[in-house]
Structures are given as structure tokens and as C-alpha cells.
Amino acid sequence: QVQLVESGGGLVQAGGSLMLSCAYSRRHSERYAMGWFRQAPLKEREFVAATDWSGHDTLYAESVKGRFTVSRDNTKRTMYLRMISLKSEDTAVYYCASAYGKLGVFWNASQYENWGQGTQVTVSS
């Protein structure tokens, strides 16, 4: 089972930017499709972005398209989420997730079997 550890969250003003990181521990990291999800207070967990095992194929929620960029570096066993033009509605706990041995990109949380503990992102207006 892969261990996932998110970092990079914090407090930022609206219009600002943050870079989240998700470090994964498993040696054969190239076999994992990965994604970012978020959960705001009193709301359901929602899809944010996803990447295939190589990082070449990506998918975004409409609400973040053009503002967020997902990438990964398998040599460093790290996935990233670059967030710019942040809005107050981006405030949430952000989770990374992995899906072992699956080709493609996935927006559905049920496709992922491993989850990190989350990192808080707070955007002040």
C-alpha cells in the first residue's frame, strides 16, 4: 500500500497562489494514476484534478480549469497542484489519492484506494 503525504497548504489572500505537494512512498510509483480532491466544511468531497501515471494526461474540474495545474515527477515520487488566482470558494481540505495499476485519468473518488490525510487551504477575501 502506498503512503501519501500532502504539504503546502496554508492561508492566502484571494488572487494569490499556492503549490501543494503529495509525496508517495511506493517504489513503483509509475504504476499509479493519481488525483486531487477537496472537501469544504459541510460539503461533499469533490474532484479537483487528476493525472495518469506519466503526467502527460490530465483532467480538471470545470471550477478550477485554467487556474490549477496538476503535475508529477516520478523520479521524486511527488505530485503537485499549482493553484493561482485563488478564490474564497477554493477554501477546503485538499487530499491526494492514488489508483494502483490503472491506466488513464479518473474523476470518480471510488477509483482511488489510497488517500492522504489532507492539507488545509484557506483563501481570505
Image (spheres, rainbow, N blue to C red):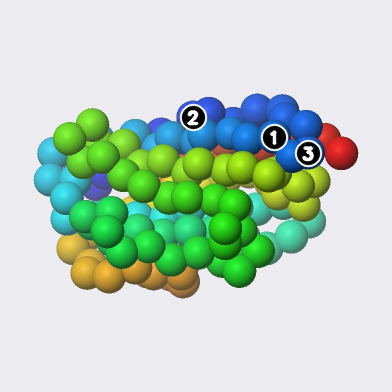
**Foreground tag (1 vs 2):** 1
Q: Is 5 placed left or right of 74 in the picture?
A: right
Does residue 95 show up? yes
Q: Which residue is mark 3?
A: 14
Quadrant including the C terminus: top right
Q: Which sits earlier in the primary sequence, circle 1 or circle 2?
A: 2
Tell me which residue sits at (43%, 50%) in the image. Answer: 70
Q: Judge whether 19 appears above or below 99 on screen.
A: above
Q: Amino acid at mark 3?
A: Ala
Q: Alpha-carbon neighbours of circle 2 within 10 Å: few (<14), some, or many (≥20)?
A: some
Disc number at residue 16? 1
Q: Amino acid at mark 1?
A: Gly
Mark 1: secondary structure: loop
Q: Quadrant of residue 24?
A: top left
Q: Which sits earlier in the primary sequence, circle 2 or circle 3?
A: 2
Q: Is 62 placed left or right of 116 in the picture?
A: right
Disc number at residue 75? none
**Residue lying furthest right in this view?**
125
Does residue 113 show up? no
Q: Which residue is mark 2?
A: 7
Tell me which residue sits at (63%, 35%) in the image. Answer: 17
Between 61 and 45, which is closer to the camera in this rendering? 61
Q: Are marks 1 and 3 in contact (CB under 8 Å)?
A: yes
Q: Quadrant of residue 78?
A: top left
List x then y, in percent, for residue 5: 41, 34
Tell me which residue sits at (50%, 36%) in the image. Answer: 20
List x then y, in percent, for residue 31: 17, 55
